[in-house]
Image: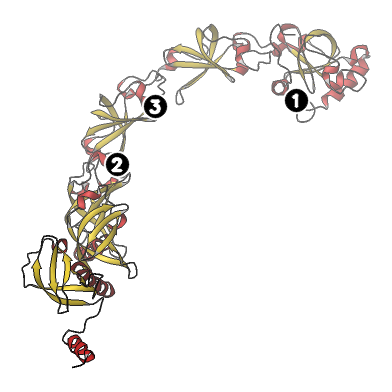
Amino acid sequence: MSQATLSELIAGSFRELHEGSIVKGRILEIKPQVILVDIGYKSEGAIPSNEFEDEDIQVGDEVEVLLERLENDEGMVVLSKEKAAHKQNWEKIVKVFQEGGLVKGKVKGVVKGGLMVNVGVEAFLPGSQIDIIPPKDLSEYLGKVYEFKIVKINDERKNIVLSRREVIEAERAEQRQKFLDGVNPGDKVQGVVKNITDFGVFVDLNGMDGLLHITDMSWGRLNHPSEMVGIGQALDLVILEVNREKERVSLGLKQLQNNPWENIEARYPVGHNVHGKVTKLVAYGAFVEVEEGVEGLIHVSELSWTKRIARPSDVLTVGQEVNAVVLGISKEERKISLGVRQLDTNPWDDIDARYPVGTTLKRPIRNLTAYGAFVELEEGIDGMIHVSDLSWTRKINHPSEILKKGEEVEATVLGIDKANQRISLGVKQLETDPWNIIDNRFKVGDVVKGRVAKIASFGAFVELEDDIDGLVHISQLSEDHVAKVKDVLNVGDEVEARVIKVDKVERRIGLSVKAMNYTDDQVKRESQAFEALRPSTDLVGLEQAFKFATEEWRPGGS
């Protein structure tokens, strides 16, 4: 027999084997480090024993292995049981992926960005795909078996990306639909608090999220949902509304309790005295719980008839028990208005008897403002002297020109407004108004002397006798054109002038420096020309003129 014929006979006695294929073999020998396997080839293959970990094997057992190489450098067949299993599992995984099915796997380790899972082959589970709410501690999943959806496969790199979140979401979608199909408003359900926000609580209704709004949690006032419930807390609730299109469910908690606002008007009629506990202090008032679920508001203005209370916290504290009077009730808005000051007599009720109009009194100045002085008549009750009631003749820009905080001032009661709790006082009314007899003191053509008290753009104010001021209009300073009053006069200058106008109604005295040497007829004509300057044009009344003065005058100023 020829050599060629012998080779062909030997080759034919072996099966057709291809590298990279999965073949069946039989265990020949079990050694500590390797397992020898016969695949029907001229030589056996050696497989590391750790590839048979957790498996009970015996000599003669049949196993499936991957034929990596028919011969290595030592002439042995190179086999792998793990790679055979990997190839078989990979093909199964690819088929599951193509069919959109689920695969089971065991979490093996924590890596950057997620978990490694054994689904027959190694796969990656991103942290964002572990659960609906990304977990804080990934180690809690180690060793646990779950079902996953395969979301991505890279055949070249042999990479697999899994998602457990999509499996959960699909299950919840099915549960949601089942829940929505079988629930109606009015039904009682149980749920677990899943999330707490400022406006309410999201409750897990066995896969369906429902919203328990803060207004449906308690009949009383609630600052934040966390005051009543905590994450993971089980609640008995009632369905208020179901929107199947938007898959939304509104829940109620307070509806399972009796509404304390029913017949509220009968229990707390207006004028009724109540006792309660302060639950909250705000800038505008204090909330007082008069019974469980029912609160009333004491507005800051209802705390005292006379005390100036800036903040309720100045006189009240949370938890303090108080007595109050019911001022008003709105059942629809669930509001009760309360008052504390109504427990005492209102000192303004008989204020006109204690301070009749025309009464002269002497009291300390509590405060000064731009428009007047507040005088303390008694504790908590002020009267006000308006700046215009300080002097008949002086043009006072600010009460501080003649008054000081803390000093006593004599004044007379001008008027009382009980409704708005206001008392008007006057100082100038203690004296006779000199303008009533002004015609007897100043006549057109008279020569007068005085001191410049204030400079304005349109003229100079001259202080005459008895604190009466006259105005020298800029046109009356000189026969020549004057561009600025300061070019001719300054505050403190002594001035001699002639009276060319006396207006008792508008309390104005017009003066002229240039008319000092005029004849009586000339003065008369100048007076007529001055008359043409009305308050709406070039000349304004002294009361208004001082608002536009460019320099301020103070007693003793120069």
Residue beneath label 3, please?
301
Instruction: Relative to 529, say whether 172 is above or below.
Output: below
Image side of residue 399 versus residue 180, left or right: right
Q: Which mark is residue 540?
A: 1
- In which quarter of the view is residue 53 placed? bottom left
* Labels 1 and 2: the sequence-earlier one: 2
Report the front residue among 500 and 109.
109
Q: CA distance from mark 1 to mark 2?
A: 57 Å
Q: Secondary structure at mark 2?
A: loop
Spot occupied by residue 520 in the image (x, y as percentages of width and height): 92, 14
Q: Which amino acid is tagged 2?
A: Arg
Image side of residue 32 versus residue 166, left or right: left
- In which quarter of the view is residue 431 placed? top right
Q: Which amino acid is tagged 1?
A: Val
* Labels 1 and 3: the sequence-earlier one: 3
Q: Nearer the viewer, mark 1 or mark 2?
A: 2
Instruction: Relative to 507, say whether 136 is above or below.
Output: below
